[in-house]
Image (cartoon, coloured by chain):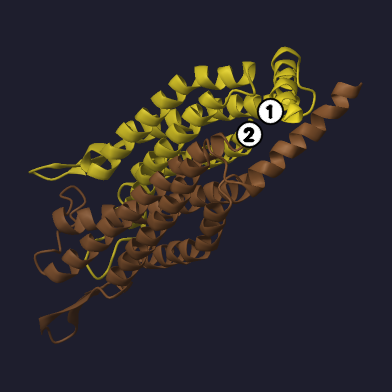
Chain colours: A yellow, B brown
Amino acid sequence: MSTTIEVPESSNVTKDKAVLGAPPRSGGWKKGVAIMDFILRLGAIAAALGAAATMGTSDQTLPFFTQFFQFEASYDSFTTFQFFVITMALVAGYLVLSLPFSIVTIIRPHAAGPRLFLIILDTVFLTLATASGASAAAIVYLAHNGNQDSNWLAICNQFGDFCAQTSGAVVSSFVTVVIFLLLIVMSALALRRSY
Amino acid sequence: MSTTIEVPESSNVTKDKAVLGAPPRSGGWKKGVAIMDFILRLGAIAAALGAAATMGTSDQTLPFFTQFFQFEASYDSFTTFQFFVITMALVAGYLVLSLPFSIVTIIRPHAAGPRLFLIILDTVFLTLATASGASAAAIVYLAHNGNQDSNWLAICNQFGDFCAQTSGAVVSSFVTVVIFLLLIVMSALALRRSY
């Protein structure tokens, strides 16, 4: 019985030590992950804002027109591209709001709460970014190649600038997706040895 | 010095106890999460296989034809739908292969390794499933509504069965995505207090 009483005492002592002193083993590694997390988030903000802005300013009017209407293509023409602009703006907004939590994990590398919060919301916004990027990519592919069976003609011969701009926005959104994947994997690895 | 030597001894004793006997505090909760994980994975396999099979068998030939060609629509007609079938089959295959790891987390609820493995691969395949579902949804939307500015006409008036079948496949893929989100959130919560 005396040994079992000693057990909680000694474990309390070690716990106090871990809280008061700096833990020498894994603390530096976790701080490095947290700083990397912060830098990657800045890159993701740039990529997401770039994607939303590139898509949102895509607008091309052809220099010729018929009696009845002028030929114009903008992101308004496609519901998918409107969804893309809104979603990427939302993702950029979330990333800006997540920066304080990333700073908290730098200051307190062993706190599991902020990391858990970030990993769950990152997963949700990864899904949003992937959905908008992939659906816009499907439309961009159609605009480039068309589809014979449904008689949808490629429009990139006429609207070359429009196609180039929307393709760039899609690439930028995929950069955001890759950064999100890295963030989640890093958070999961850092979360593992929190206790 | 004698106390510091006693500390690892006593902690070894508690560790053995935790492994041999049932841990009373958080073990039951973690086992519940692991069993839920297994059941959700079975549902995700059904949804992913259903999505791939529904899309893969979508094929409609119109009863009339001209002198030169017959009107036919199948998933082969659209590159996006081919991508969808391949991706959802891959996701279903991964989910089947992940079942043993899910069983390991049921048997050993406190092991962090299998959970970490599952959360990282789940995130990757969540991205794959979302990308294929969203891009197929963009094409299905075009098939239903068409697009005036690029002169792409809706084909669902002619190919009604084809459209219904592809729409069902898209819905089924989104069910898979939602289950993946639940799996990742649950794994992250269970990973938190592993140590």
Q: CA distance from mark 1 to mark 2?
A: 6 Å
Q: Position of residue B73 (x, y in %)?
A: 22, 73
Q: Nearer the viewer, residue A81 or A109?
A: A109
Does residue A78 appear left or right of residue B115 in this picture? Answer: left
- Kindly indicate whether the residue at mark 2 contacts the one at mark 1 (C-beta within 8 angstroms): yes
- The image quarter containing residue A4 is top right
Q: Of all residues shown, which one is farthest toward the top?
A: A20
Residue hosting label 2: A190
Q: Position of residue B54 (x, y in %)?
A: 27, 70
- Report the chain holding disc 2: A
Does residue A9 appear left or right of residue A72 in this picture? Answer: right
Residue B150 to residue A46: above or below: below
Residue A38 to residue B143: above or below: above
Residue hosting label 1: A30
- The image quarter containing residue A123 is top left
Q: Nearer the viewer, residue B170 or B37?
A: B37
